[in-house]
Amino acid sequence: MRQILIKSSIELTPEQKKKLENGIRSKEKGELVFVYQISDIVGGVSISDGETILDASYARDLYQLRKKSRELIHSNIKKGIPVNKIPYIIKEKLASLIDHVPDKAVCGRVISAADGVIRAEGLNNCQYGELLLIGTRGFALAMNLEENCVGAILLSDMDTVEYGDTVYTTGKIIEVPVGEELLGRIVNPLGEPIDNKPAINYEKTRHIENEAPRIVDRQKVNQPLSTGILAIDSMVPIGKGQRELIIGDRQTGKTSICVDAIINQRDKNVICVYVAIGQRASAIRKIIKTLDENGAMSYTTVVLSTASDSAPLQYIAPYTGCAIAEEFMEQGRDVLIVYDDMTKHAIAYRAISLLLKRPSGREAYPGDIFYIHSRLLERAAKLSDKLGGGSMTALPIIETQAGDISAYIPTNVISITDGQIYLESELFNAGQRPAINVGLSVSRVGGSAQTSFIRKLSSQLRLDIAHYRELAIFAQFGSSLDTATREILNNGEKIVEALKQPECQPLSMLREGLYLYAIVKGHLKEIPTNRIAEFLDGYYNYVCGTATETCKKIKSGASMGDEDVAILESAAKQYKTLFR
């Protein structure tokens, strides 16, 4: 006995039902049971036996309309008519219905739907990662290919899916809009605008999943990407095309570092993409407001997936952001992308995997948890000159529990990235901003991402801080200290004070170089700790006025000769005398 499901937009009359049944029985053998259902199809009827579907609705006519409208769009583009002048309804409103509903296609049926996950039977030629159409409104992503059914994660609301709905294979994977039109916009993981602004008139889309650049397509990371944070640019430098992990407990300033880095790219011809994964909507609103107030939204795209979004949307959010950034990279431009944060991304993927009944491993994560992060982060690179020389710099964020960087997800991401910046709760609570632990922070690119002037000074700075931290631990247990130890502790305290930096106030490369010179060369030793910030600000203005040519060299990144260093030393001594 076979069940024939007949969907129509209105209730059929008994005469229409009889005529339909007689026509089907004349073509099909065996015992047939007819089930009628009122659906939201666009007129006509749709007939399905659970394996194939005969679409006698108006979808075919709409398909022809879509085909003609596409020809009209392409001819208008060739004539020079702007895309935003082409009616939006032709490009968007009919796309989901007409692109994916053929006259006759392999289809299946929803046998279960709960918690953002569906199971469908009858999809024998479905591929992994394929986009599925449910009815005429719902979309899902195939994730599990089992013997008798396909497990998929919903990309639309649960309200659009019901038990028994027809599921179509599309032969496509998820695509999102890319290009200049997304700059200054806030979009969801499907590329749809959510900032209450006009629709995005895009000309190009891109798959969210792409292969990472090959080794022969990359080149060495050798250009600095300045964050404007002195402690980072001097001791843990980031280069264009690098993947630098920001790791630490909650509320230690991880996001603030990334926001400062985005703000510092103003007027530096660097595109920024900020991906929020499972964050509180109120926190993201504050970040967007900060970027807007500092003029950073004009070159930034925000891909937003809040904590209230489903796990599937949180899962695809970083891949969407990466696709947007990749388009600019392949145009030969420099891009900075922030993933905030990868811990919540891993948790969302774990939830999806458990709902799909995949075997769980360590900490209930599935076995391919390492792969989903590596295939994302490996897409960050500096391309060879042959491919345009563009770069994508990735700053993934990982949240630790009680400072444990040896946990499962942190160690996974540490092994993928080119270094990490570790933020410590104790330093943060002690008033150190940013709260960077120099001993556990490292950049595997190192001096290649620094100018020669800063590279010479920063190596000494790192040693001085490490020495100070070591002695400070032992000094708290000792009752009396010798003169040399007290001098090291006093100098270290002033260095730490000089490295403190308020939020949203990134420093220019020139200011960083001059500050670093004063710190390393010991010009702060005689300055009271509470007046160091005042001294550095006045010192910068004084040197800019008295050593103009030397400052131009520092700003351009040119190498400094002995004569230039002597001019800097003389200016620092003169201002120190004036300050005292």
Image (spheres, helix red, strand yellow):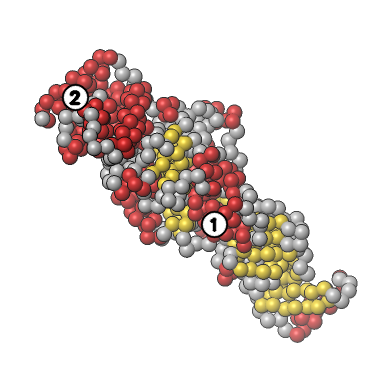
CA separation in Å, label 2 and label 1: 54 Å
Check disc 1 and report its element: helix, strand or loop: helix
Q: Quadrant of residue 226?
A: top left
* Amino acid under disc 2: Ala
Q: Quadrant of residue 357?
A: bottom right
Mark 2 sits on what residue?
A: 572
**Rendered-image quadrant of the N terminus:** bottom right
Please state the horizontal and vertical placement of residue 223, each as a whole percent of the image: 43, 29
Q: Farthest residue toward the bottom?
A: 14
Query: How packed is label 1: few (under 14 Cα within 10 Å), some, or many (20 or more)?
Result: many
In this view, the residue in front, 303 or 349, is: 349
**Does residue 154 appear anywhere in the picture?**
yes
Instruction: From the viewer's perspective, tell me whether residue 542 is left or right of residue 288.
Output: left
Q: Residue at x 49, y 54 (%)?
A: 344
Above or below for 153 versus 327:
below
Mark 1 sits on what residue?
A: 348
Please state the horizontal and vertical placement of residue 78, each as a whole percent of the image: 55, 44
Q: Farthest residue toward the front?
A: 479
Q: Residue at x 72, y 78 (%)?
A: 36
Please state the horizontal and vertical placement of residue 342, each as a whole percent of the image: 49, 49
In this view, the residue in front, 145 or 383, is: 145
Q: Residue at x 54, y 39 (%)?
A: 416
Please state the horizontal and vertical placement of residue 557, each as a whole percent of the image: 34, 24
Q: Residue at x 39, y 47 (%)?
A: 254
